Amino acid sequence: MNEQGVLVLVGAEALQLKDRLEASGYTTLEWGAGNKTIAASGQSQMAAIVSPGQMLEVSELRQWFGTLPILLGVSEDSIHARELCFSSGADDFWLATNAPSDLLQRVRLHLSVQKRKEEFSSVIVVGDLQLETSSGMVRRGIRSIGLTERESSLLLLLFKERGKAVSREQILREVWNDEQGVSSNVVEVYIRYLRQKLEEGGDTRLIHTIRGRGYCLNNGVPFLKSP
């Protein structure tokens, strides 16, 4: 079960850490031709671990993932190595000759900083969909989207749980406050309303149905492990 987050591993040295990272509670995905779409599916709290000598991969990762933390491996802890690391666009370095615990500490630090930024941010983003938490204004690209109060509450819940499956029961509990007499299919009805508004004009689907588990707001088809 993924407790900590999803880490994208790039190169041989990073892949050698796979077992240790997974034992620490992370899900790992190898950055390769077959997994790039899956890895870039927008799941929450991701970071990339890049092997030494793979500096050119940093710019591609940045294009796919935007502001996710990227940690580039270095073979020696020198000023020159650090300069090359940061000039590549990476957020931090890790010394391949050090124990994995050092890398894990750096990963936790970056994910913690990322989480705090999200908590204090007034704008939540999934793909090209933006929600201003202070005003409740929703935009898809440059298009403003008008929502009813109930639609807005439902979308806010999906934003808060982005990248995760949200069950019908949780939606009824948090959006409808378990109101008496509310039909269980009301969730499907409002999900349909939201999809119609978000996908107007042929925009791609962001609210995905996870069979047997509920709904997930995600930029691309979500890659979710079985509970």
Image (tube, rainbow, N blue to C red):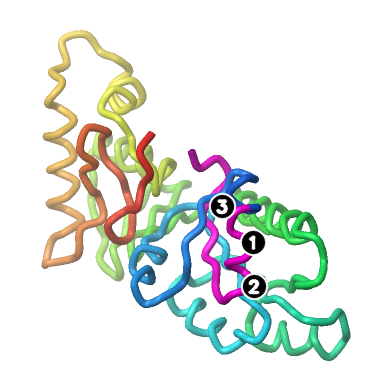
The answer to whether 43 is drawn above or below residue 56 in the figure is above
Instruction: Check contact, mark 2 vs mark 1: CB within 8 A.
Output: yes
The residue that appears at 47% across and 52% down in the rendered structure is 44
Q: Give the extent of the magenta segment.
A: 1-19
Is disc 2 surrounded by few (<14), some (14 to 19) or many (20+) residues within 10 Å? some
Is residue 18 within the magenta segment? yes
> What residue is shown with label 1?
17
Provide the secondary structure element on which disc 3 rests.
helix
Is 55 in front, or is 53? Answer: 53
User: How many callouts does the rendering have?
Assistant: 3
Of labels 3 and 1, earlier in sequence is 1
Q: Position of residue 156 (x, y in %)?
A: 37, 41
Q: Position of residue 153 (x, y in %)?
A: 33, 35
Q: Position of residue 220 (x, y in %)?
A: 29, 61
Mark 1: amino acid: Leu
Residue 69 horizontal side relative to residue 176, left or right: right
> What residue is shown with label 3?
118
> What residue is shown with label 2?
13
Q: Quadrant of residue 184?
A: top left
Mark 2: amino acid: Glu
Q: Quadrant of residue 33?
A: bottom left
Is 201 in front, or is 43? Answer: 43
Mark 3: amino acid: Glu
Instruction: Check contact, mark 3 vs mark 2: CB within 8 A.
Output: no
Provide the secondary structure element on which disc 2 rests.
helix
Tell me how far mark 3 sits from mark 1, CA to CA: 28 Å
Tell me how far mark 3 sits from mark 2, CA to CA: 30 Å
